[in-house]
Each structure stands twice: as C-alpha cells, then as structure tokens.
C-alpha cells in the first residue's frame, strides 16, 4: 500500500504546532514568574483623565495619586473613628485666631469673633522627593524618542521645602490647572481670588513677551507659559523658613486640617513644572498631569492611562513604620504583626485597565488580581446566607479559596432631591412640605436596597452616614417623620400615612383639589442608558401610583442635566450622592446650607434648600469640636431636615471588598486611598494558588486533533 | 488608469469636506462648546470663568462656521470649523480636547494593537468564509448544505457579545488556555490576541459564508464550470482555481469594509478584551464628547474607506482583465 506521505507530513506539522501552542498557552496575563514578584495587581475600571494632584477629582484617580504623593497630614491606618497623624510634620498644627483688628483670640473663640486664623506647619527636615531628571540641571534625553521622564537623565532629588507648598497653592489658583477645588477653597483661604488675578496677569505678560519674541500664537497653547508660582503673592500662605509655613484662613474653620490630608495640597517642586515646560520634554508629550513628581511611597514607572499604570517603590521615601497600635480589638491579631516595620512592604503596584466587569471578576477568581469589589451580577455566586444568623457570608467555594470578605459602610449618602424652587414640590409652605413627606414615605428605600442592591446598603434616616459624629441612632434619634420603629429596626411608615399626608396637602388620591387635575411629578435624570434605571423608575412609578401620584421621567444627557440643575429648571432629581471629603458632619450638613445653593451660588446644595432656621443652627455647629453641645445642635438640624424633607433620604451603600488570603494587613479606609503602603503580600502562597487554580485543560484539543488525524488517514470509500 | 486614479483622488476632497461638515453639524447640533468644556472640567470646576478659559485654551471660543465680526475671508477662516476640521487636510489632527495629547501620536500608538487584532480576523474570516462557502456551494441541496446554512443562520442570530462572553468563559475559565483580557507589546501580545481573534472570526462566519455561497453558486451554474468538470479536472481545482477567481469581484467589493476595521479597530472586541486600540479610543472620545478625536477618527475612517474602494477597483482589473478603468 502506498503511504500518503503528504498527508502525514501535513499532520505532523499540525501536531507540532498544536503541541507547541498548548505548551505555551495559559491564562496568566502577567507572565510566568509574576506571582513570585512582590507586586500588587489591581484593576482600574473607570477612565483616568489625569494624575495631577491639584486637578484629579475622582476616587479612582485618588486611588493612584494618593500612593504617589504624601500629604502633611493623614488618617491613622488602623484606628477608627478616624484620627489625624502627621507623616511629614513634627507636630499636629494648632490654630491661632485673630479678631477683625488683628488681635489674637485665646482658646477656642466663637466663630463670629474670628476674622482670621492661622495654621503653622513645621515640616520634618530630610523628607526627599523621588529621583527625577527635573532635579538635575544637566539632564537631557537619553534616547531618540523619549516616552517617559526616565528616558531623560541623570536624575537628582532634593528635600521637600515650605516653598513647594506655595508653588502648589498658587498653581491651584491658576485657572488653567482646572482644579475643582478652587471655588471651595476660596470659601476659607485668604486671598485666593486675588492670587488668581495675579497669576492671570503674569501669564498674560509672559504670553505677550513670547509673541513679541516671534513665537507663533499656537505655541502658547501647545507649550503654555509657565509663571514662577513661587514669586506670585498669595495671602493664603506664608513661608516662615525652609521647613515652616503658615496657612492663613479668613475665618474659623477647623475642618481645614482634614483638607490637608488630600492631594489638592500636595507639595509640588517648581523644578518639575519647569522640566515639563522644556521644549524637548513638551515635544515628547510628557506632562506633569500624567507624570507627577512627589515624595510619596511610590513613584510612576509607567503611565499608559488606557492600558496600565505601574508604580514602583520610591527609594527616597522617608522611614515610616507600620503602626504599632490600632483599635482595642486589634490587639493580638494579625493586623499588628508588622508593627514597627518600615513601609512600604510591596515593591510594585500594577493598576491594570479592565473596563468590563466579567474579565475583572474572572481575573480575581483566577488569582491574578489580589483584591476586588463584588459585582452586582456575581452577588448570588459569591455570597450565601448564613443559616444560623441570617448574615451574609462568602459562598463555600470562595471560602475554600481562602478569599476574605470585608463589608464596610463608607461615608456616602444617596438621595433624590426635590427642587425647593419648584412651585409644586418646593418651598417651605405646609402644602409642599406634606407633599414631599408623602412622596418620601411612598418610596420605601429599604425595599429598594433589598431589590436592587442585594441588601447592600442601609436606609438613610437623614444625610449623615453611620460613623460620622451626630449620625442618627434609631430609635433614639431616628427620622420619625418618615419612619417608624418596629421593635428591631427603623422601617418606612405605611402607605396609608402617605395617603393621609396627601389629603392634608390638598391632593386626595393624587388629585389637585384646587384644579381637579391629577398630580404629575417629573423625575429628571441623566441615566437613560444605564441598565438599572428602567427597573428603578418602574419601581418608583409603581410606588407613587399606589398613593395616586403619576411619575413621569425626563431624561437628558449629562450636560443638559447639569445645565438644568444650574438653572433650577427641574422638579424631582434622580439619585444624587455625596461622598465625604472628610469625616466631619459639617461636610454633609453643608449640603443644605443656603450659601451653598446650587442655582444661586453654584454650590453642592442641589435641592436649593434655604431655611434661615437651619442656616442659623448650621452656622453654630459648623466650626465646633465634637462635643455634646455640637451633638445637640446636629440633632436639631437633623430634625429640621426631617420635617422639611428637601430630599428623599435614600441609602448609604455597603461596600464589599474581597481579598485573597495572600494579601495581608487590609483595612478599608473609605476617606483616603494612601493605604497600599501598609499591605503585605505572601507571594509564595499566591504562586501556589495561581498554579493550582489555573492548570490548563488541554485534552479537548488533543482529542479533536486525534479524531482529525484518524479522519484524514483512514482511506475514504469511493 | 492613471486618469481614473487621479479622478478618484480628486473626488476625495469634496467627499472629505462633506463628511467633515456632516460630522461637525451633527456634533454641534447636540453639543455646544460650553457643553464640551463642562464635560471636560467636571461638575466641580465648571464655573463660567473656567468654561471660558477652557474654550480659549482649546480653541472653541470662536463662532462655529461664520464669524460675523471678522473682516474679509477671516469671516470663514476664524471659525471653529475652519480651524479644527479643515486643518486635518494638511495633516494637523490637533490635540485631544480631554487629555491634551496629540491625536496623531495617539493614533500612531493605538493603530498597531488594532491592526494586530484586525489582521488575523480579516485574513481568518476571509479564508474561512471562502472555504466554507465553497464547500457549501459545491454541496448545494445536500444535507451538508442545509446543515451548513442552518448553522450560519444560528451564528448570525447570536449577538457578538454572547460570543465574547462565552469565549472568555470557555477559553479562560474552563480550559484555562488564554488570558481573559489584557494586552502586551512585542511577541507577548500573541497570547492576548488569539482568543479575541478566534471570537472575531467566529462572529463573522455566519453572514460571510452565506454571502459568499451565493456568489459561488452563481458561478457554479456557468458553462465554464461544466466544461472544466467535463475535462476531468479535479473538483478542488474547479472550485478553488476557476470558480474562486471568477467570484472574486463581489468578494473584493466587500473587502474595503473589513479594511476599515484594520485601522479603526473593532469597538466591541477591544473594549471587552481591554486592548488599547483605536476602537476603544473612539468610544471613549464619544463618551467624553471629545470632538477633536471624533472628527479625526471619522476623517481617517473616510480616507481609509475611499482608498479601500480605490484599491478594490484596481484589484478588479487584476482578477478580471476585461475590466478597464
């Protein structure tokens, strides 16, 4: 018999290719030895626009930046309630107060007496910036097409000085920086508006000089003029000496210290701005907003915003020990095992761009991401109800993998606002107030959380989330206008109560007694494309229908929605949220102060609520320390808000974080994100688990190839 | 042919101006420069002064297409349309409105991942479609043909999203042979591209095979096929030498569409497999109301499409010498 040599040869080639492919194939996205390296892998699911500490405003941007910059103040990693610590300072700054005549006011004076306050910051000497070519005057491009600052050399470094804080603050005043905080900081820092004008004048002067020197107008936009921020006067900051600076506030504002934990006040070396303004660096499209230079525990090694951001340990990071004490219940637990050891523990952090939920979750389950949130769609697969206590816990499969769950209620409040300028639902009149209360009762947010969030949230009593001083503690200080105590927990009142309130408001069964027309409420939203909106809206409409109110939706794109908000041209607003900037009740209660009205003052009081009674109490409690007197005032403020119901108090979300067993020292911090330096990895365990969980399954391909071989070689019947 | 070629190139200019005008009109019908500024600045930084500064910095402080205050020709040249859209004709794509990065640089960086994904999909789909369509056409009316067509209809009916999700589940979770998503440069990228490429090929298999089958069926009924068979040529030679060559014209007509995706990327695949290509770039730009990127990508797409059509015309003359341009 003649052998089909051609077929045999082809099959041999196919077999060789298949075996070679199968030998190299695996699902590891990081490479063969990656698990062994001391590298943390995390995901970025939302677009990061920039990493400029003065302009970045989203939590996912903070998650990266806060590990690059270090702030003068920070929150204690382990202790709760949150406590301030001083990583860069010799001591916690204390305020000095002055009256209108400039005379010092002793102790804790009443806010109304204070015309100026000062905070003096004493920097620890010897805190160094990361190595960077900006600190060496002789640095130049080392490669033909530089793509990273590291492509320039040599690198230098220098000490962080008081002047760098001035550079930062004056740059924040530069309108071109686009800092979202400028308006808010003007509310308490002295002379920022004047500083902005001075920066504008200096930029105009520099632009004019460049044009006179023959540069084209387009050059001013491609390489904007850089004013020397160090020399521009700014009343808000005074440089006392190399390591001492003073912030000047125009009123009493103790929350200022909390702001000093945020990256908006990060020190910026002017050399870095000069470096990125060099023509050759500018031509290489390297910008400070993508490559910040700072003094934090990590520094940028790779910045591809649409693919991967990689941070590596900053070799100049000043010695910082892991905390040796935490909450009382932490004593003797693993969380204190690393007490006193030098931070950071992890050498490298990879933030990998993964915009879709399924790949992110799959990689976490495969062990390729070290931690993860819990996607809503995966809730049933990952969680199970503990039969004993009815508490949620991880599914046995997840527990078997050594995954740990941490559930926290971050200081976030969601609400649905009424426009207090609207003639139907707004205003402080009795009729409108009763109508708002009826609507709020009909929308049972506890049920909403159960249906749409798998129970992951707590029904709001008011605006203050749990853990914030003065938050409602049912049944003692619950919202009795909308809720009732059922013996175990606070629940929404019956619909009959809402119906009765509608009758009192002059809308029996949802019909306007005066006009005879049915009552229609219009819900403004910018969520038309969001998958859960349709169901949520149907749920809301059904609930309001039960008391006779018709709910209609008015969907707009984000811009149009924001424009309508600014104009006050809306009635009822879908799902707004407030994430705490700092752990103080003032940060939430100011959402209802008249001075923050969105239409009139462009502030965050989106409901445009304006109550002289509330304003007076808010002004008193705003600057007080957390004392029983402040608590009493907060209770009063809460009662006014409960009564007026300017918003439907929605829920405080419960975040679930999952971490693999090889990630140690994880403690959620829902206020700041400078926490990766405390984490430690057991890379040997990670490598072992990854190998066990991801053994390639090759037999289906071998079987198919065998069948194909047989089909090819067996002679066909003619 | 040269005259034809030059004529087609000349057509390119009015077409591109028209495309530009259309995109410009559609974009600014639903957005204003103020909207763009507010979107870029975010909710907390969109004070009127900041919006104005943003517009000045990004060149959106001019009238859209007619500047009544300007003298002479500047009435047209000192407008957003002229400064932004027409500048692309001399290769100035400008900078992104949201990130400030050079769009040309971004395209240069992203075109390779897109190309690396689209090329195997293009070739794989083309070869698989032609092979399967030819086999089905040759077996016309048999059980194999009916089963094949049924399978094609099933493949066409399933959303490409399902293929992606199932592909990720099977290849990464169950067989554990490919990363579920991600990207790397150099040779390492192969590992990340195999799965999306296979998914891309399977997604295009149903419609392509059915379409090509009709092209081949038409040829199979021609006299020259009967003659070739009568001469005793092997069936494979008849199909893949004679029929294929004659059926190539309609196949070539279809190719520019695929060619476009080689450069502009596959939106869905890039998004789900986290490939930093031009598809995701365009989607993100639309979401961020980044007009600079949107107009550049549409412009580039139009140019590539027109060049693709031109190349297809040239290819006609190669596969069928009777065609004169």
Image (cartoon, rainbow, N blue to C red):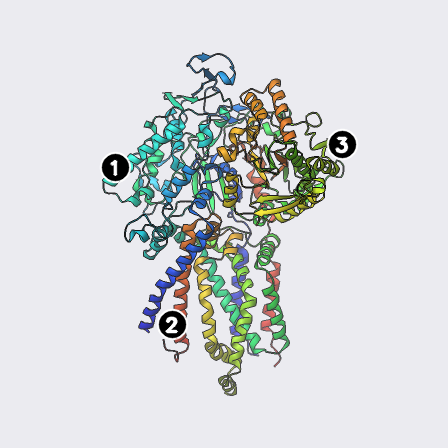
Within 10 Å of disc 2 (Cα), the crowding (few <14, some 14-19, many 20+) is some
Q: Chain of mark 1?
A: A
- Mark 2 near mark 3, Cβ–Cβ under 8 Å? no
Quadrant including the N terminus of chain A: bottom right
Is B156 situated left or right of A143 in this image?
A: right
Spatial separation of the CA atoms under disc 2 and disc 3: 81 Å
Tell me the residue that label 1 is attached to. A209
Residue A709: x and y in percent read 58, 69
Tell me the residue that label 3 is attached to. A486
- Residue A296 appears in the figure: no
Q: Chain of mark 2?
A: B
Q: Nearer the viewer, mark 2 or mark 3?
A: 3
Tell me the residue that label 2 is attached to. B314
Task: Tell me the quarter of the picture where residue A208 sits.
Answer: top left
Residue A566: x and y in percent read 50, 39
Residue A680: x and y in percent read 55, 34
**Badge 1 element:** helix
**Badge 3 element:** loop
Mark with earlier residue (1, 3): 1
Spatial separation of the CA atoms under disc 1 and disc 3: 74 Å
Q: Nearer the viewer, mark 2 or mark 1?
A: 1
- Labels 2 and 3 positioned on one and the same chain: no
Q: From this view, report whether residue A330 is shown above or below residue B146.
A: above
Q: From this view, report whether residue B268 is shown above or below residue A323.
A: below
């Amino acid at each position: 018999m003649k052998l089909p040599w051609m077929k045999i040869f082809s099959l041999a080639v196919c077999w060789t290719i298949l075996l070679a492919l199968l030998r190299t194939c695996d699902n590891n996205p990081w490479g063969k030895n990656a698990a062994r390296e001391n590298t943390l892998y995390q995901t970025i699911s939302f677009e990061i626009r920039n990493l400029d500490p003065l302009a970045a405003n989203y939590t996912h941007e903070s998650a990266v930046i806060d590990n690059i910059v270090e702030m003068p103040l920070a929150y204690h990693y382990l202790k709760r309630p949150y406590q301030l610590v001083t990583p860069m300072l010799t001591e916690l700054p204390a305020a000095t107060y002055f009256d209108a005549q400039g005379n010092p006011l002793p102790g804790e004076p009443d806010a109304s007496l204070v015309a100026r306050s000062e905070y003096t910051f004493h920097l620890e000497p010897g805190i160094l910036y990361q190595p960077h070519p900006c600190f060496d005057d002789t640095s130049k491009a080392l490669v033909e097409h530089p793509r990273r600052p590291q492509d320039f050399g040599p690198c230098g470094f220098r000490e962080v000085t008081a002047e760098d804080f001035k550079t930062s603050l004056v740059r924040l005043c530069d309108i071109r920086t686009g800092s979202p905080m400028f308006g808010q900081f003007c509310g308490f820092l002295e002379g920022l508006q004047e500083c902005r004008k001075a920066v504008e004048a200096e930029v105009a002067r520099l632009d004019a000089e460049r044009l006179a020197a023959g540069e084209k107008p387009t050059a001013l936009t491609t390489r904007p003029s850089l004013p020397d921020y160090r020399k521009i006067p700014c009343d808000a900051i005074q440089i006392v000496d190399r390591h001492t600076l003073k912030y000047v506030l125009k009123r009493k504002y103790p929350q200022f210290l909390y702001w000093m934990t945020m990256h908006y006040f990060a020190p910026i070396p002017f050399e870095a701005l000069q470096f990125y303004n060099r023509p050759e660096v500018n031509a290489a499209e390297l910008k400070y907003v993508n490559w910040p230079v700072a003094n934090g525990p990590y520094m940028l090694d790779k910045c591809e915003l649409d693919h991967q951001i990689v941070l590596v340990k900053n070799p100049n990071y000043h010695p910082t020990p892991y905390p040796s004490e935490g909450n009382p219940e932490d004593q003797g637990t693993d969380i204190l095992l690393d007490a006193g050891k030098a931070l950071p523990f992890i050498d490298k952090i990879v933030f990998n761009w993964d915009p879709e939920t399924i790949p992110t979750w799959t990689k976490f389950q495969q062990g390729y991401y070290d931690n993860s949130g819990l996607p809503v769609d995966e809730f049933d697969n990952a969680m199970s109800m503990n039969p004993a206590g009815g508490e949620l816990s991880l599914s046995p499969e997840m527990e078997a993998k050594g995954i740990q769950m941490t559930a926290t209620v971050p200081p976030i409040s969601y609400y649905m606002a009424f426009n207090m300028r609207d003639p139907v639902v707004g205003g402080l009149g009795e009729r409108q107030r009763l109508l708002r209360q009826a609507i709020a009762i009909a929308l049972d947010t506890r049920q909403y959380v159960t249906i749409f969030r798998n129970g992951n949230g707590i029904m709001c009593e008011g605006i203050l989330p749990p853990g914030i001083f003065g938050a409602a503690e049912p049944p003692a200080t619950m919202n009795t206008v909308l809720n009732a105590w059922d013996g175990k927990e606070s629940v929404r009142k019956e619909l009959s109560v809402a119906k009765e309130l509608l009758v009192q408001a002059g809308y029996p069964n949802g019909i306007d007694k005066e006009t005879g027309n049915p009552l229609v409420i219009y819900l403004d939203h910018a969520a038309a494309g969001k998958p859960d909106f349709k169901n949520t809206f149907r749920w809301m409409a059904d609930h309001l229908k039960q008391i006779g109110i018709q709910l209609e939706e008015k969907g707009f794109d984000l811009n149009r929605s924001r424009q309508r908000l600014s104009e006050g041209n809306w009635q009822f607003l879908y799902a707004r949220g407030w994430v705490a900037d700092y752990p103080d009740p003032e940060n939430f209660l100011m959402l209802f102060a008249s001075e923050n009205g969105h239409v009139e003052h462009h502030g965050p009081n989106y409901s445009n609520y304006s109550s002289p009674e509330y304003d007076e109490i808010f002004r008193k409690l705003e600057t007080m320390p957390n004392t029983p007197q402040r608590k009493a005032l907060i209770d009063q403020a809460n009662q006014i808000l409960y009564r007026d119901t300017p918003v439907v108090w929605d829920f405080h979300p419960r975040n679930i974080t999952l971490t693999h067993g090889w990630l140690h020292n994880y403690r959620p911090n829902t206020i700041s994100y400078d926490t990766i330096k405390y984490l430690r990895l057991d890379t040997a365990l990670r490598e072992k688990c990854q190998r066990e969980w991801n053994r390639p399954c090759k037999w289906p391909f071998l079987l198919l190839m065998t069948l194909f071989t047989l089909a090819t070689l067996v002679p066909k019947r003619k | 042919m040269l005259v034809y070629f030059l004529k087609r190139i000349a057509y390119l200019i009015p077409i591109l101006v028209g495309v530009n005008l259309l995109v410009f009109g559609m974009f600014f019908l639903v957005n204003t420069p103020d909207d763009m500024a507010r979107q870029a600045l975010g909710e907390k930084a969109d004070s009127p002064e900041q919006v104005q500064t943003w517009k000045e910095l990004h060149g959106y402080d001019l009238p859209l297409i007619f500047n009544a205050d300007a003298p002479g020709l500047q009435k047209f040249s000192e407008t957003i349309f002229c400064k932004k859209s027409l500048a692309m004709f001399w290769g100035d794509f400008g900078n992104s409105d949201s990130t400030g990065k050079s769009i040309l640089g971004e395209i240069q960086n992203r075109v390779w991942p897109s190309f690396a994904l689209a090329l195997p999909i293009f070739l794989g789909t083309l070869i698989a479609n032609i092979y399967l369509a030819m086999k089905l056409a040759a077996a016309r009316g048999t059980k194999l043909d009916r089963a094949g067509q049924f399978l094609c209809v099933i493949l066409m009916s399933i959303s490409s999203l399902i293929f992606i999700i199932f592909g990720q589940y099977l290849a990464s979770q169950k067989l554990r042979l490919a990363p579920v998503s991600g990207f790397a440069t150099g040779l390492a990228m192969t590992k990340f591209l195999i799965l999306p490429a296979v998914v891309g090929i399977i997604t295009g298999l149903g419609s392509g095979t059915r379409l090509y089958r009709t092209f081949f069926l038409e040829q199979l009924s021609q006299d020259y096929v009967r003659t070739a068979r009568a001469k005793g040529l092997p069936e494979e030679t008849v199909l893949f030498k004679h029929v294929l060559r004659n059926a190539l014209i309609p196949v070539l007509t279809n190719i520019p569409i695929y060619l476009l995706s080689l450069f502009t990327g596959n939106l869905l695949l890039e998004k789900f497999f986290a490939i930093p290509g031009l598809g995701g770039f365009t989607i993100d730009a639309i979401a961020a109301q980044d007009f600079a990127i949107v107009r550049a990508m549409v412009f580039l797409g139009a140019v590539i499409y027109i060049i693709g059509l031109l190349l297809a015309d040239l290819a006609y003359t190669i596969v069928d010498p009777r065609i004169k341009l």
